């Protein structure tokens, strides 16, 4: 089928839509002029007219040396019309790196406060819940760490959970600083990493049920014991790790580019 561009007056050749028989009366097919880029709405004739053999195109001036050029139109979809005249622009990963840096610092602060509550702030009862995340004290007592592994490898790993959490929090801060410096952000790797941090924090919270001799009481009894001992802050690192997972999931599903006008 043929039509003429109302903007540049160029002759355009295009194919009718495949579902022309199901189109409503007066439907206008959107095509794009390859010459000037203007989107045109062409009214599709009846199915009977489409089934007929299309006439051969004849230039307006058959005696000219060169016939008028016929352009093959590009069919425009709704998505193409939405991004018409726009180009993708890659976004910087620095804002996301700042968010991960803040969460990493907060996770690291819980470890430091747990260490201080063990060493210097033992009289502050509110901080006793963070003692379970004190990986620094574990690192300073290598003999006790070796003794835990001598009992069993599982008990040694459970005893090392605060150390793993400390290194995970510290590595989150360092990696966030590196990503901020280079302006890039590994979305999928960051989400997987956040799941690992949450898993370690959850294991520390439920540590009595881990190891070679797990506790025989229920999880409800474990929470009641925590509340009775007023060790409420034990839930803070787990909550921070959960927030980290939620933000990392949002960072992962949101693409690192946006469509901006081509003039920008």
Image (cartoon, rainbow, N blue to C red):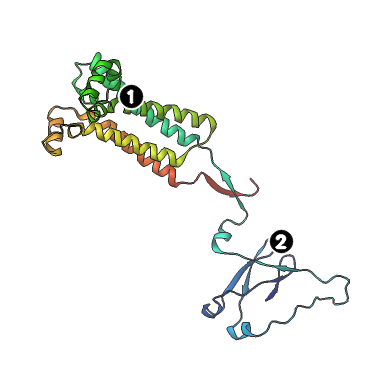
Up the image or down, 252 lies above or below 182; here it is below
Res 153 visible? yes
> What percent of the width, then of the height, locates residue 185?
49, 37
Camera-side residue of 255 and 264: 255
Res 120 visible? no
Give me the residue at 43% from left, 44% from top.
252
**In the rendered image, which quarter contains the C terminus?**
top right
Camera-side residue of 154 and 239: 154
> What percent of the width, then of the height, locates residue 50?
62, 82
Give me the residue at 58% from left, 83% from top.
47
Please report whichever mark, 1 or 2, sits nearer to the chain's N-terminal start: 2
* Helix, strand or loop for disc 1: helix
Q: Nearer the viewer, mark 1 or mark 2?
A: 1
> What percent of the width, then of the height, locates residue 261?
61, 50
Is 257 on the left-hand or right-hand side of 251? Answer: right
Q: In whole angstroms, how far apart are the C-alphas of marks 1 and 2? A: 60 Å
Q: Residues within 10 Å of mark 1 (few under 14, many from 20)?
A: some
Up the image or down, 198 lies above or below 70; here it is above
Q: Residues within 10 Å of mark 2 (few under 14, many from 20)?
A: few
Q: Which residue is mark 2?
A: 36
Camera-side residue of 29 and 162: 162
Up the image or down, 119 lies above or below 171; here it is above
> What percent of the width, then of the height, locates residue 89?
58, 45
Is 20 on the left-hand or right-hand side of 173? Answer: right
Give me the residue at 22% from left, 33% from top.
205
Camera-side residue of 156 and 255: 156
Name which quarter of the figure residue 115 lies in: top left
Q: Which residue is mark 1?
A: 109
* Helix, strand or loop for disc 2: loop
Residue placed furthest toward the top: 120
């Amino acid at each position: 089928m043929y039509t003429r561009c109302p903007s540049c007056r160029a002759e355009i050749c295009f194919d009718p839509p495949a579902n022309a028989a199901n189109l409503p009366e007066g439907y206008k097919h959107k095509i794009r002029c390859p010459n000037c880029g203007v989107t045109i709405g062409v009214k599709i004739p009846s199915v009977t007219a489409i089934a007929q053999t299309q006439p051969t195109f004849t230039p307006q001036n058959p005696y000219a040396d060169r016939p008028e050029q016929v352009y093959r139109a590009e069919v425009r979809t709704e998505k193409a019309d939405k991004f018409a005249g726009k180009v993708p622009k890659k976004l910087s990963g620095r804002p996301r790196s700042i968010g991960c840096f803040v969460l990493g610092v907060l996770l690291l602060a819980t470890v430091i406060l747990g260490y201080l509550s063990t060493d210097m702030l033992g009289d502050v009862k509110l901080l006793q819940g963070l003692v379970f995340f004190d990986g620094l004290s574990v690192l300073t007592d290598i003999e006790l760490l070796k003794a835990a592994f001598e009992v069993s490898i599982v008990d040694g790993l459970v005893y090392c959970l605060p150390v793993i959490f400390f290194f995970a929090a510290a590595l989150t801060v360092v990696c966030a600083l590196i990503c901020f410096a280079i302006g890039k952000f590994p979305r999928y790797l960051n989400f997987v990493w956040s799941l690992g941090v949450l898993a370690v924090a959850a294991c520390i919270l439920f540590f009595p049920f881990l190891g070679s001799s797990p506790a025989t009481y229920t999880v409800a009894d474990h929470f009641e014991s925590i509340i009775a001992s007023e060790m409420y802050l034990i839930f803070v690192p787990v909550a921070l790790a959960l927030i980290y997972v939620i933000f990392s999931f949002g960072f992962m599903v949101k693409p690192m580019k946006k469509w901006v006008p081509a003039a920008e």
